[in-house]
Image: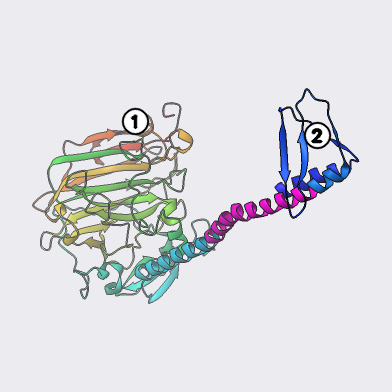
Amino acid sequence: MCLMCLLGDVSETSRRRTTTIRNPIKCCLLNYSRRRKQQHIRCFHHHHSPHQVSFKSITMFSSSFLRLVLLLCLVSSSFSTASPSNTTAADQTLRPQEELQKLKLIRQELQKINKPAVKTIQAISIFSKFSSDGDTIDCVLSHQQPAFDHPLLQGQRPMDPPELPKGYIKDEKSYEDSQLWSLSGEFCPEGTIPVRRTTEQDMLRASSVRRFGRKIRRVRRDSTNNGHEHAVGYVSGRQYYGAKASINVWSPRVASQHEFSLSQIWVIAGSFTHDLNTIEAGWQISPELYGDTYPRFFTYWTSDAYRSTGCYNLLCSGFVQTNRRIAIGAAISPRSSYRGGQFDISLLIWKDPKHGHWWLQFGSGTLVGYWPAFLFTHLKQHGSMVQFGGEIVNTRPGGSHTSTQMGSGHFAGEGFGKASYFRNLQVVDWDNTLLPVSNLKILADHPNCYDIRGGTNRVWGNYFYYGGPGKNPRCP
């Protein structure tokens, strides 16, 4: 820029035959020498009359002065532009290097998660039975699933089914054939399990490769609950060896990729700080984890309050799957509709009295698999609390409460066919016996956004309605 400005100024000067130089200071003398005789241009005090300076003098001075300034400009320009240009080049080189490194890490993780498939099944899309853009299900040999990467499980095979809790009654009303991938009529062969294939795009959506497949721990610094909001029923104060419930399935709206909405059972032990142990199962909508807004069957576990242990589904070495007809992480269908058909899934979690592992059953008698006892510290013995209910993540987009829905997206007071429910709430005691929950407490930490109402009747036993729309006039 300085070069163009100077050339413009000198060109204008050269057009004039004579130039008058005025200066209001008392006296100034500009001396310039460049292998020639010294030339002087005197500037006079403003009380003196202006003097005419010849065109020749001005031209000689301008020419010499221009050479000097041009030299200074070029040197200055080289210094001022060298650093940014080098930085830009470095950045441009660094960014591809960072991207390549990230992709390398992703591919390494994918090799750990996606095991060799004996058979592959393409799930039908939720939008059309003729479309094949749903999940890809890999049939993996049972002893090669991710769980057996754990040092304490290497070389072993899945355990045999345990003894069911006493008092267990098959729930005939629970909808069992509820996974989209199985609508094709294909299933995995004996000796294998169905595993939803993880893609590069799945991992790229995560905040980091390290956090992929883990629950969002903290989303806001201004919140005591880390942005997680709940409407739950819970029992505590005793020793719990399992829990059972039927969970109404909906497709609530999730407003952001970095939020989720879920409905689940928690079996909990330890404190709510660094040593929290949880076993979790239910359905969830998580655009970040799955890349869509379908309700999906999921599991989760942690032994250190979601810090570094545990994961969703089969995304790390932990949960051992034993069933060839249920794919954890796969989409659930059908779903309930407002004032329409209502569908629910029945889940049972309980501790095997013989080996101490925590087993999961889906529907009316379908064993899914187990969490080995060694994964936990406190849950090696028993749980100290059981929770049932809904949870969402609120990132407060634009500074206001999220419009992510919980349950059906309607408040509990609307009742059956409109609000989501949990029914037939039970716990397993020390004698491996299923009992109706007693002294159920209910809690909604943001009742103007999501609420809960409990009750008891002969058909549903202990139950509650829960949920809400999120942002509304009472929840700004």
Which residue type does callout 1 highlight?
Pro
- As for residue 64 lying within the magenta part, the answer is yes
Q: Is residue 173 visible?
A: no
Residue furthest toward the top? Answer: 47
Give the residue pinned by disc 1.
447
Q: Position of residue 161 (x, y in %)?
A: 19, 66
Which residues are the magenta region?
A: 62-91
Q: Is residue 9 left or right of residue 77?
A: right
Residue furthest toward the left? Answer: 431
Give the residue pinned by disc 2.
21
Q: Which element type, helix, strand or loop, lies under badge 1? A: loop
Q: Which element type, helix, strand or loop, lies under badge 2? A: loop
Most prominent secondary structure in the magenta stretch? helix
Q: Which circle's residue, 1 or 2, is located before the other in the chain?
A: 2
- As for residue 358 lying within the magenta part, the answer is no
Answer with the quarter of the image where residue 453 lies: top left
Label tally: 2
Contact between marks 1 and 2 (CB within 8 A): the answer is no
Q: Is residue 459 left or right of residue 18?
A: left
Answer with the quarter of the image where residue 142 lies: bottom left
Which residue type does callout 2 highlight?
Ile
Q: Nearer the viewer, mark 1 or mark 2?
A: 2
Residue occupying the point 28% across, 39% down: 232
Q: How is the image coloured?
A: rainbow
Residue toward you, 18 or 156: 18
Quarter of the image for the C terminus: give it: top left
Q: Position of residue 68 (x, y in %)?
A: 71, 51
Q: Is residue 59 left or right of residue 160?
A: right
Residue toward you, 475 or 152: 152
Say if 101 sits above or below 245 in the image: below
Q: Is residue 61 visible?
A: yes
C-alpha distance separating marks 1 and 2? 80 Å
